[in-house]
Image (cartoon, coloured by chain):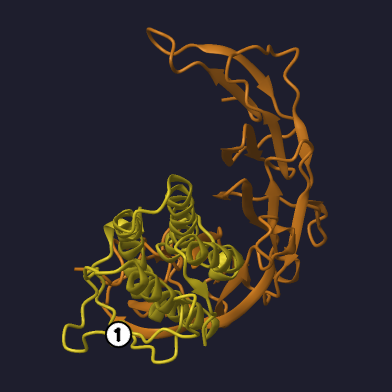
Amino acid sequence: MFLRFYFCSLTVPLILMFSVGCSEPSTNATQMSPQNDVHNHAHGDEIDSLKDGIAKVTSLRDTIRNSFAKDDPDAAHGPLHEVGDLLLQIPKLAKKQNFDTESQAAIEAEINTLMNSLGAVDRTMHGQEGSTYAEESAKIDAALTALCQSCGLTPVGSE
Amino acid sequence: MVAGRVDVVHLQQPGDPKIAYSFQLPSGMIHGATQNSGKVCFAAADGIFWLNADLSLQKTVETVQVNHLSLGTDEDADKPLQTGASTIERNWVLCTTGKGDQSTLCLINSESVQPSVVKIKIQVANGLSLTTPETVLSLGNRYAFLFQDRSDPEVEVQEQLTIVELDPNRDRNFSGAAIKTTIPVTASKIDGHHGHHAIAFDAYGRHAVFTEPDEGVLNVLSRKDMTVVARFKVGGSLDNIVVIGAQDHFH
């Protein structure tokens, strides 16, 4: 899958100041950790917590969505690869939280949905038969919302 | 070879290939053939003939059923329009027919039980004719590129490149195909079958590279806005072109 093979992108990830993915149930917003602006290659940096991982997935989703909306697919391409690598880390981080079997299975199912949808968009970027972002957008948003809920985080949308 | 005769040969049989059976098309001058989605199409003097591919040699000359697709009539010559080489894109066969104001891109859905011809009229000046379409999948959109080359090298007329978006609404039905743009190109340098404009695409379909044979120029065209973004004078009489790889995104 391209998302796995090509996560080492030359594209510099954008620093999103306003994106918010999920929050703890008791709060309304999550402070994003600023990305390292010196190391400008997306190498799928290790994420320490599930909360940070999902916040970063949401941030990358926003970058991808907004780039396609501006008809700038090249700006979406690097984040598209980066999010694939990041998604693979989420189930491992979830296991550390000791969720029950049902929640863990739901998390893995939502990750699969996101991988499939974003992978289809990436195939299109690579000149193959795939989907446009517009075609997968609703599915991606729904899967990300469900992922937040399965992880016990409250989806709060994004800007 | 008898005009209009088609030989059916089982290539996987042991020993030398032998003709299983032969049949005759209603008209001769077969000058092109292709297969797609289980159908075989022949370009002949009178449009296109097609039949279901007999992959297990179940048929005989008595039972093989040949079907006809007319491309219309050449009004000047009062004879059937014909085509030559064709291109396959997904389950569709693409070809061109006619000259000047009768120039048409023809699209045939091979998956249809009874295929018909979808015709896209293309404005072509007298003295020019359409080349065989070349297709590309680019960022989810499919395009056909057709040059308008001189049919008579002595005639001074501006040659063109016409780009057709094959599936604007992405429903995988090319019957909604529409002309995206037409841009002027410098002259071909036709000598027999050589010297036509040629085009090829990078691995991701993001850029096209096409030749201008008379001036010996290679052009790089961006799919994003369908404009030429670079020109390289390489000299000589350019003929075919191959593109390998794509813009470097990765390390």
Relative horizontal placement of residue B68, taking residue B197 as reference (left or right): right
Observer-nearest of B93 and B154:
B93
Q: Quadrant of the C terminus of chain B?
A: bottom left
Observer-nearest of B156 and A39:
A39
Q: Residues within 10 Å of mark 1 (few under 14, many from 20)?
A: few
In x, y percent, where is residue B109?
70, 46
In x, y percent, where is residue B81?
74, 52
Q: Is residue B142 above or below residue A38?
A: above
Q: Is residue A119 above or below residue B113?
A: below
- Label 1: which residue? A33
Residue placed furthest toward the left: A38
In x, y percent, where is residue A142?
58, 65
Instruction: Check disc 1 and report its element: helix, strand or loop.
Output: loop
Q: Is residue B186 visible?
A: no
Q: The disc labelled 1 sits on which kind of residue? A: Ser
Observer-nearest of B212 and A34:
A34
Colour seen for chain A: yellow
Relative horizontal placement of residue B208, taking residue B149 as reference (left or right): left
Q: Is residue B89 above or below residue B53?
A: below
Q: Residue at x 66, y 55 (%)?
A: B172
In x, y percent, where is residue B125?
67, 77
Colour seen for chain B: orange
